[in-house]
Amino acid sequence: MLPIFKCAGALYTVLVKQPRIATGDYELAELPAGMIDGGTFAGAAARELKEELGVTFTDNELVDMASSLPGSKGEEIYFSPGLLDEKARFYMVEREVSPDELGKFQGKATGLLAEGERITLWVVPLDAVPACVRDGKTFIALYLYNNWKRRNG
């Protein structure tokens, strides 16, 4: 999910930093993401944003960014189809916030401890995200957002 917060004329997102043992990084920065444990894709996206950011969004606020691609049928995007069946949908949401509201995200500890999640939030200007991450899902989300923005203004 790509949460975009408009604040004082600028665009920001909130990345999550969490241990990703396979990478050897205990604070890998990436966009919030999660598994579908029943329900709809949009419902799972909204649930993950609530769990990881503490912000409630409705299914209707979320935009399926891949649906704006030419020829898209709203299908999932595969990450490594020659090796894995892992796939994802990419949603974005925009919300206007005050500087105080945006500041409350910075450094906040979140995640479901019962599921072993140890997450720290990091507020980043949207245009600075590529320099802050090494996560492919985040780069795909940024590409889809830029494509969606070109098509939808």
Image (cartoon, rainbow, N blue to C red):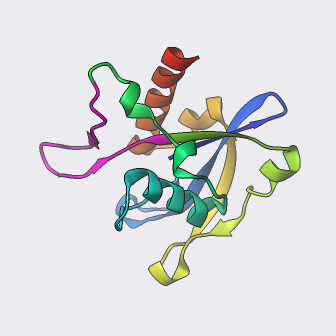
Quarter of the image where the C terminus is located:
top right
Residue closer to the observer: 45 or 23: 45
Residue 47, percent from left and from top: 52, 62
Q: State which quadrant residue 10 falls in.
A: top right
Q: Is residue 128 magenta?
A: no
Residue at point 14%, 49% (across, down):
83
Magenta-drawn segment: 72-91
Q: Main secondary structure of the magenta part?
A: loop
Residue at point 54%, 80% (across, down):
113
Furthest-bottom residue in this view: 114
Q: How many marks?
A: 0
Residue 13, percent from left and from top: 64, 42
Residue at point 38%, 52% (across, down):
41
With respect to residue 81, does 122 lie above or below?
below
Furthest-left residue in this view: 82
Residue 117, percent from left and from top: 51, 73
Residue 10 visible in this rendered orientation of the protein: yes
Residue closer to the observer: 90 or 104: 90
Residue 50, percent from left and from top: 60, 62
Residue 30 visible in this rendered orientation of the protein: no
Q: State which quadrant residue 93 falls in.
A: top right
With respect to residue 70, does 139 lie above or below?
below
Furthest-front residue in this view: 60
Residue at point 54%, 75% (across, down):
112
With respect to residue 55, does 71 lie above or below?
above
